[in-house]
Image (cartoon, coloured by chain):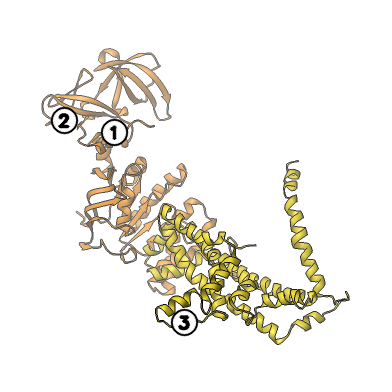
Chain colours: A yellow, B orange
Amino acid sequence: MKNNTRKWLAAPYSVWAVGFIIIPLFVILYYAFTSEEGALTLANFSYVLTKENLKALGLSLWLSFLSTVICLVLAYPLAMILTSRNVSQTSFIVLLFILPMWMNSLLRTLAWQTLLEKNGVINSILSFLHLPALNIINTPAAIVLGMVYNFLPFMVLPLYNILLKIDKDVINAARDLGANSVQTFFQILLPLSMPGIVSGVTMVFIPALTTFVISDLLGGSKILLIGNVIEQEFKQTNNWNAGSALSMILMIFIVFSMFLMNKYDKEGEGSVF
Amino acid sequence: MSNKLINLVDITKIYDGVTILDNLNLYIRENEFLTLLGPSGCGKTTTLRILGGFENPDEGRVLFDGKDITKLPPNKRQLNTVFQKYALFTHMTIAENIAFGLKIKGKSKAYIDDKIKYALKLVNLEGYENRSPALLSGGQQQRIAIARAIVNEPKVLLLDEPLGALDLKLRQDMQYELIRLKNELGITFVYVTHDQEEALTMSDTIVVMNQGYIQQIGTPEDIYNEPQNAFVADFIGDSNIVDGLMLQDRLVEILGAKFPCVDEGFGVRKPVDVVIRPEDINLVKPEDGIITGRVTHLIFKGVHYEMEVAANGYTWLVHSTDMVPVGEEVGLWVNPFDIQIMNKPESEDEEAPSLEE
């Protein structure tokens, strides 16, 4: 009786999941393996496995990796500082970090475009100060900047949560047993915060790998990431079969990297899955 | 006489404007089992954390073997701590936990393996090397925490309420274990607890603390039999604390009755606090008692009966192996030797805690 009620409570979400997650996945699968006429084929894969597309995929992987590393390096010390402060201060600083997440990411990326433009805000200030202009708009650097800016909170929050859970006396115990602060960090704090790192890395790496808005706005049309290529196949070339095949390839990369991450997260606490 | 190993000199610690420790002075002798005893917030844990190096005192110095270690970080101190919630490294096996301090010091593998074996044997957990600490019971985790600390051969072991999270039976077993360990290792133990029974059972020296001040330092017998003020008398064991008037040497007036006692030097007609332990009150025939009263309450406690006797406007707590039924008239008689006279409290921290239990 009780079990049945619980099942019914899950019904709305089940409908949603089937309608908007599972069916679309099968649609992509169908398109990826059929020709325009509907015949079963692998031609889409050989069609999309071009040098340019592989270059776009490689660049995507490289830039998302770079952004993830930068986010981790920025977020870890910040999370450590946050957990060492007293409560009233902390909630304010955490709020500062969450605040941008409440705003649409498209708007925020557009704002960066305006800031970074050749005659944009930053360069106006730099030229006013007689400093050399900053020309990173439409370069990979601008894309990485946009990714880090957009996804940094997703790194800070899981790290903050995991560090908050670690008993301060465990750190004290390591110090007590003779470890200096560097040894304590690498042998105790870092391994214990691994679930948070895994969760943060996943939450930054995957959206960075699939983004096309950031590369579109900050990379101009010159730099193509895999997300942009897929977008073009669907919207410009109108070749849904090729776009689906590319999506499949990207998905394989995502599942593979998730698998790698989960291997390092033994306890599975911080994992998204 | 063994020499003073640790000396705390004029230690003051203030948190957010609240004084936790006020000008505390204390020395710890080599090879003694010293217990810091007091209610929560009395400053006992802060004292221990200052010893361990996890807190810096705002004023004062910590001397170890005559050397000033006040500013020394924990990893440079020759003492190890056993934390209240064990603080084991959950991402390591038990052997790795125990080896942690030795690996940091760069000891050889053979030496470390030997030490792990020895320590596990000492805490009665042989064969547990490759288990994960998370799978152990509270008592086992605590013993691993002790093993992890003692393999480093500290001169002093600091223990912060190590038995607080264990159930009663286990706690009593662990008390004997700790005394055995202390005797086998021959090192100094500094133990923090709020449990007076634990303190009385294990310690060579008890330091009773309240509100950041030391109330009394002494052997368990001293502390129990001759409490120096109402706070100590009330905190250690059950007691009857009543107002008294010292009429002359060896005679005190309590609630209108004259009691012979053995205390001298308090002066004439001086108001004092009088402590009489419940087991020191003898129930006699009404005509033989110094005062007489009526039993109002009776509980069987196993070893003895606990009775409340209303006499001269005070409800006396009496422990006796003789049972007197409720409502019966009875005489109370106290051996002069069992009456403890104390000066009235000079400050709030020396007062008996208000009745909350």
Q: In which quarter of the image is the N terminus of chain A?
A: top right
- Residue A246 place in picture, x, y as percent: 73, 76
Identity of the amino acid at label 3? Ala
Of all chains, the one bearing label 1 is B
Above/below status of B231 relative to B1: above
Q: Which is nearer the eye, B81 or A99?
A: A99
Q: Marks 2 and 1: CB-CB under 8 Å?
A: no
- The answer to whether marks 1 and 3 sit on the same chain is no
**Nearer the camera: disc 1 or disc 3:** 3
Does mark 3 fall on the same chain as mark 2?
no
The label shown at residue A133 is 3
Dividing the picture into quarters, in which one does residue A168 lie?
A: bottom left
Within the image, what quadrant is residue B71 found in? bottom left
Q: Residue at x 40, y 16 (%)?
A: B326
Residue located at (13% from left, 24% from top): B269
Q: What residue type is labelled 1?
A: Ala
Quick check: can you spot residue B218?
no
Location of mark 1 (residue): B352
Measure the alpha-carbon separation of dots 1 and 3. Answer: 75 Å
Residue that mark 2 sits on: B263
Residue found 79% across the figure and 63% down from its top: A23
The kind of residue tagged 2 is: Asp
Tell me: residue B205, above or below residue B305: below
